[in-house]
Amino acid sequence: PLYSFCVCFRTVNEALLFLFSCILNLFEVFYLCLHQSFRVPLKQMRSLRTELRAVGLLDQVLKENHPDTYNRRYVQCFPPGLTSLSLGRSSEKIYNYMDAQFYGDISLGTPQQNFSVIFDTGSSDLWVPSFYCVSQACAGHKHFKAFESTSYNPDGHVFGIQYAMGHLMGVTAVDTLTIGNLTILNQKFGESVYEPGSVFVLTKFDGVLGLAYPSLGQIPGNPFFDNLMVQKKVDEAVFSFYLNNTEGELLIGGIDETLYSGPIHWVPVTVKGYWQLKMDRVDVQGMNSFCSNSCQAIVDTGSSLIGGPTHAILTLQQLIGATPTNIGEVNYFKLQN
């Protein structure tokens, strides 16, 4: 229905002020339409490492899922030609979700099928479990049903991703990706059909949406954010994370200036794979402890830990009073201040 209303003014100035206010509001709406950004709420969960520790399985999983040991056990299950899963490749392109704590929701297909994913700056691929997944890890998660999507297109490629604490294999496809009010057409993604082992069984998230550079990808085609830029869905090629102790937010296409104070300190990316940058040094309690001549580091939303070379991390643990175990865990730490 159409509605009409009448506004009366006592003076010409009041009428002009009202008109000026309306014009400003129209400009604001027009600006927001041109400069779109999209907010994705992020939910906090207990990390997989914490879940495994709570049920007494952490030691067993860490020992059984060493990458080389895992490859030798399941190598006969992998199709030939998947170099990412071949023996001797354990140190290359390894991503770890043992310590991920934040996840958000996406949808794939038409009509939409919903999934919870880790928005991960440490990898580039998008994958979710397939309806045809035969692994125990898929049983407790949502499955993508290709036969129910009218926008689905099979891609026909096989992919494999090696993780520090698990391995994954599947087939690639193309479909419509929806995140909040944002729709991306023809997005390539992986349908996981094989997730050996128990690593992904206890995870709260169904899959992973990678936000790193394309060079890290195992699935051919543009990763999510590159596809977003190609389709010109946002004006600014920027995404930003806000994380606190209970919740978080991924802002696609901009920065929320109300969530921080002071200027942003921009740091150049040194290698376009991970979000890799030069770290000048590491100070503990005001004293330079290691990395005194600078070192390379990555910013990884797929983990909640500080990781690094063994000698440097041992130094850091000693300085904060931590006691490491024989499997790389920290039993206890206490900060002086």
Image (cartoon, rainbow, N blue to C red):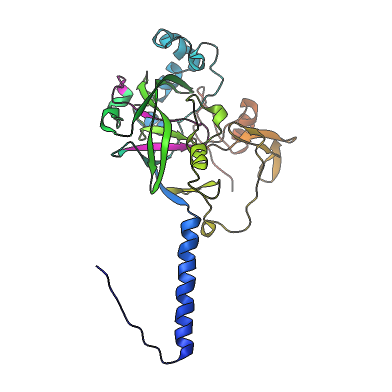
Where in the figure is residue 110, as x and y percent of width and height? Answer: 30, 38
The question of residue 223 being in magenta is answered with no
Residue at point 55%, 45% (across, down): 237
Residue 280, horizontal then vertical, whole percent:
71, 40
The residue shown at (54%, 58%) is: 257
Q: Residue furthest bottom?
A: 10
Task: Answer with left or right where residue 96 lies relative to residue 275.
Answer: left
Does 293 sit above or below residue 154? below
Considering the image in quadrants, where does the N terminus appear?
bottom left
Q: Residue furthest right?
A: 293
Query: Furthest residue to the left?
Result: 1
Q: Left of 230 or right of it: where is 73? A: left
Q: Which residues are magenta?
A: 114-136
Q: How many marks?
A: 0
In the rendered view, tell whether residue 74 sits above or below residue 60.
above
For residue 318, what is the image quadrant? top right
